[in-house]
Amino acid sequence: MRAASPERGLRGRLTVPGDKSVSHRALMFGALAVGTTEITGLLEGEDVLRTAAAMRALGAEVERVGEGHWRVAGRGVGGLVEPADVLDMGNSGTAARLICGLLAGHPIFAVLTGDASLRKRPMKRVTEPLSATGARFSGRSGGRLPLAVEGAADPMPLDYVVPVPSAQVKSAVLLAGLCARGITRVEEREATRDHTENMLRHFGAVVRVEADGNRRVIELEGQPELRAAPVVVPADPSSAAFPLVAALLVPGSEVTVQGVGLNPLRTGLFTTLREMGADFSVSGERVEGGEAVGDLTARFSALRGVDVPGDRAPSMIDEYPVLAVAAAYARGVSRFRGLAELRVKESDRLAATVALLAANGVRAEVEGDDLIIARDGAPVPGGGVVETHMDHRIAMSALVMGLASERPVAVDDTGFIDTSFPGFVSMMNGMAGEGVIAPAEELA
C-alpha cells in the first residue's frame, strides 16, 4: 500500500484500540483468578486473540460477549491444565514470553511456537532466569521457538536483577513467582512499564515496590488467591502515537484521541514531542481500572530536533520508529540514545527505522545504540518503498511519513497491521480523506 499527502488537514475525534499490554495481562490474570473476570475495551487484534486462545487451551473459560467485551472464568493460581496441542502465539513476543512465566510455575508440559518473525526472536532472556524456578526449556539455538516447556512441580521463588530493561522479562519472573512459596524479588535498574504490578494488586496479590530514582525493586508474595476483578482496558498510547504524530506533520490538522492510557511509565513519547515544540495537550484526566487515562489533542506544529536520554527509552520503546518519522520533519539534530532493545523486536527495528528513512531521502546514522537524524527543515522527498520485515510499527510509521512527504510512501506489506491496530487504514483515511492510504496501484 501507499500513503499520499491529503488535500486538507487531518481532523477527527478518535478512539484507538485498547492497550495491548493491558489486554494480554487481563486475559492471563483472569485465567489465574477465582471467579469470572469481566473485561471491556479489550484489543481484538491477532496478538491478543492468540493469548485468549492460549488461556482457553490452558483450561480457562474464555468467552467474547460483544465488541471488546470478554469474560474469563479462571482456574486459580496453580490451576492451569496441560494443553492438548501446540500453543501458537502468532507474532506476539509479549504473549510468548509472559506465557513462559505462567507455564514455569505449573507442573505441565506445553510447546510454544509462532510465525516466521516470532520464531527468529530470542527467548533466552526469559528462559534463563525461569530455569532457576525448576522449570525446563528446550528450544532451537538461542532458545528460539518452537519451545518445549516443562513446568516445575514445586517452583522456587526467584531473586533476579533484570540485566537489560524489559517489562516482558520482569513480568515473566513475577508470573512464575505466583506459584512459588515465599517472596519473589525482581530488581530493575531502569523502570519499565508496570502494568503487571498494577494488575497483580487489582486481582488481590500483595506486591511491594521500592523506588530509588529509576531503580525499582518489586517483591511479590507467592501463592496468593487471586480474585476475579473487572478490567477496563485504556486506549493504547503506542497506537495513539500514529494519528497524533500524523496530525503534527500535516498542515491544518487537529486530532483528538480519547481515553488514552497515561501510565507514567508509558508516556515518554508525549514528553519528547512537547520538547520538540509540539502543540500537544491533555484533557479529561481520570482513572479507569487502576490506570490513568486522558484525551490527547495534537495540532500541526513546527518541530525542532531533540536529544532524548537513554533512561527514557523504556517508557517509549515501541514509539521510536514513528518518533524518527517526526524527527525527519524537524529542524535540527535529533539524537535518540540507548536503543539496544530495538534490535530484538519484531524486526531489528533500529536497522529497519534507518532503512525506512533512507528509502525516503532522509539520512540517519547509528552510533553504538544511538540513532541520529540531522535535518535542515527541507521537505521529506518520500517516494520510497519500505521493507517492513513483518513489523507492524515500521509499516504504520512509513504510512504516516507518506501523509506529509512530497511523494507517496509505499510499504511492501500491511497484512500484519491488524495484529495490533485493527482498522488502522480506515481510521487514517477517515481523518485524511478516503483513498489517501490505498493499494499501491491506485496511487501509481
Image (cartoon, rainbow, N blue to C red):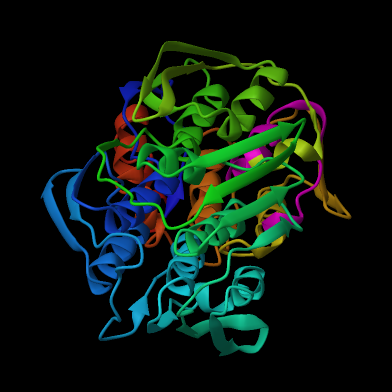
Please provide percent x and percent y for residue 261: 44, 29
Farthest residue, direction left: 65
- 332 or 293, which is in the foreground? 293
Q: Is residue 333 magenta?
A: yes
Residue 323 figure quarter: top right
Q: Is residue 337 magenta?
A: yes
Q: Viewed as shown, does residue 393 lie left or right of 163?
A: left
Q: Viewed as shown, does residue 128 lie left or right of 104?
A: right
Magenta stretch in the rendered image: 315-342
Q: Viewed as shown, does residue 263 lie left or right of 426?
A: right
- 68 or 382, which is in the foreground? 68
Q: Viewed as shown, does residue 41 lie left or right of 428?
A: left
Please provide percent x and percent y for residue 262: 49, 26
Please provide percent x and percent y for residue 413: 44, 63
Which residue is located at x 61 percent, y 37 percent? 209
- Please say if 140 is above or below 372: below
For the question of whether residue 417 can be seen, the reply is: yes
Which residue is located at x 37 percent, y 47 percent? 421
Please provide percent x and percent y for residue 350: 71, 56
Which residue is located at x 26 percent, y 40 percent? 229
Residue 28 figure quarter: bottom left
- 37 or 279, which is in the foreground? 37
Farthest residue, direction front: 182
